[in-house]
């Protein structure tokens, strides 16, 4: 993409603000009745206890993206979730954004009802109402993107998520954002190899940012780091593992052929 391409993240956030206005009109009553009956599954514990060749897999249900268009034409959430669970995934990630990724909160509900794995709501969350909605639909974890939030707002949303027993995966793309994430006390950090402003990918981002984080003196002792985006080969998995990633979040390379998920996961995580 060229330097004059539109800022995709900005477009997405503008759309999220419109969606939040809709949530406000629905009111809290639309979600409150479900908040206390949703038992959370431990997302971090699953990453620690369920690894493939010493690195955990967060397997993503992803139908489409702004950069790739339709990724999976035969998109059956229950079947995909089952294939992931049977192939060794520690957790699931489900795209719920409709406008840009053709996702749905219903996909998350179906996936969580189908398997016993913890489920991350993958969306662009910028408001407490979205977090309440996430809890109500049964998410165990949510994504908070540093590039989309002021630091004060990020801290507020992390604390609010804790009050609903939701794990937060705090996503960064560079050293500056990583420092902000550490300052908030985040103990689960995702390093996105994709630039959300241009959607270009560079797997070197994981190596560089993890090296930066390891040099900081105030990192949480229980910090886990997830490498996100651009993981297509066994060598990619080995590379981010060598860099210090505890887990990888993989979507597109698995979703290209849902019928081949078991074989693709076996290939990606084959022993050194």
Image (spheres, rainbow, N blue to C red):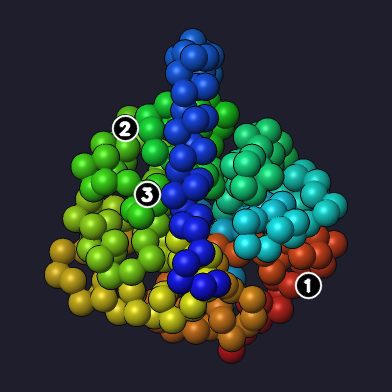
Q: Quadrant of residue 183?
A: bottom left
Say which label, 2 or 1, has the lower sequence index. 2
Residue 194, position in %: x, y?
49, 67
Residue 269 appears left or right of 161? right
Which residue carries the number 1 mark? Answer: 263
Q: Residues within 10 Å of mark 3 (few under 14, many from 20)?
A: some
Which residue carries the number 2 mark? Answer: 160
For the C terminus, the image quarter is bottom right
Q: Is residue 136 visible?
A: yes
Residue occupying the far left of the picture: 217
Cα distance, mark 3 to mark 2?
17 Å
Residue 52, position in %: x, y?
59, 71
Say which label, 3 or 1, has the lower sequence index. 3
Which residue carries the number 3 mark? Answer: 148
Residue located at (76% from left, 52% from top): 80
For the N terminus, the image quarter is bottom right
Q: Nearer the viewer, residue 116 or 194?
A: 194
Secondary element under disc 3, as helix, strand or loop, is: helix
Residue located at (41% from left, 43% from top): 167
Q: Is residue 35 visible?
A: no
Secondary element under disc 2, as helix, strand or loop, is: helix
Callout in the foreground (3, 2): 3
Is mark 3 in CB contact (under 8 Å) with mark 1?
no
Q: Does residue 234 lie above or below 152 as drawn?
A: below
Cα distance, mark 2 to mark 1?
40 Å
Q: How crowded is mark 2: few (under 14 residues within 10 Å), some or many (20 or more)?
A: some
Q: Which of 164 and 49 is in front in this view?
A: 164
Q: Does residue 22 lie above or below 249 as drawn?
A: above
């Amino acid at each position: 993409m060229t330097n004059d391409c539109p800022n995709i993240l900005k477009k997405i956030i503008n759309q999220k603000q419109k969606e939040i206005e809709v949530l406000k009109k629905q009111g809290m009553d639309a979600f409150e009745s479900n908040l206390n009956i949703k038992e959370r599954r431990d997302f971090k514990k699953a990453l620690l206890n369920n690894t493939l060749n010493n690195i955990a897999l967060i397997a993503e249900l992803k139908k489409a993206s702004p950069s790739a268009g339709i990724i999976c034409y035969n998109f059956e959430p229950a079947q995909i979730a089952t294939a992931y669970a049977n192939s060794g995934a520690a957790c699931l990630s489900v795209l719920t954004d409709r406008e840009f990724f053709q996702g749905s909160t219903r996909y998350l509900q179906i996936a969580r009802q189908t398997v016993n794995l913890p489920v991350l709501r993958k969306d662009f969350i910028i408001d407490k109402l979205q977090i309440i909605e996430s809890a109500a639909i049964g998410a165990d974890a949510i994504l908070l993107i540093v590039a989309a939030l002021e630091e004060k707002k990020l801290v507020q949303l992390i604390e609010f998520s804790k009050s609903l027993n939701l794990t937060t995966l705090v996503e960064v793309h560079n050293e500056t954002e990583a420092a902000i994430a550490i300052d908030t006390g985040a103990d689960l950090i995702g390093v996105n190899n994709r630039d959300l402003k241009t959607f270009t990918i560079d797997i070197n981002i994981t190596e560089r940012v993890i090296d930066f984080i390891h040099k900081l003196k105030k990192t949480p002792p229980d910090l886990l780091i997830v490498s996100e985006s651009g993981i297509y080969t066994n060598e990619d998995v080995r590379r981010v593992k060598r860099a210090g990633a505890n887990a990888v979040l993989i979507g597109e390379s698995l979703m290209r052929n849902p019928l081949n998920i078991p074989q693709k996961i076996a290939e990606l995580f084959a022993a050194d």
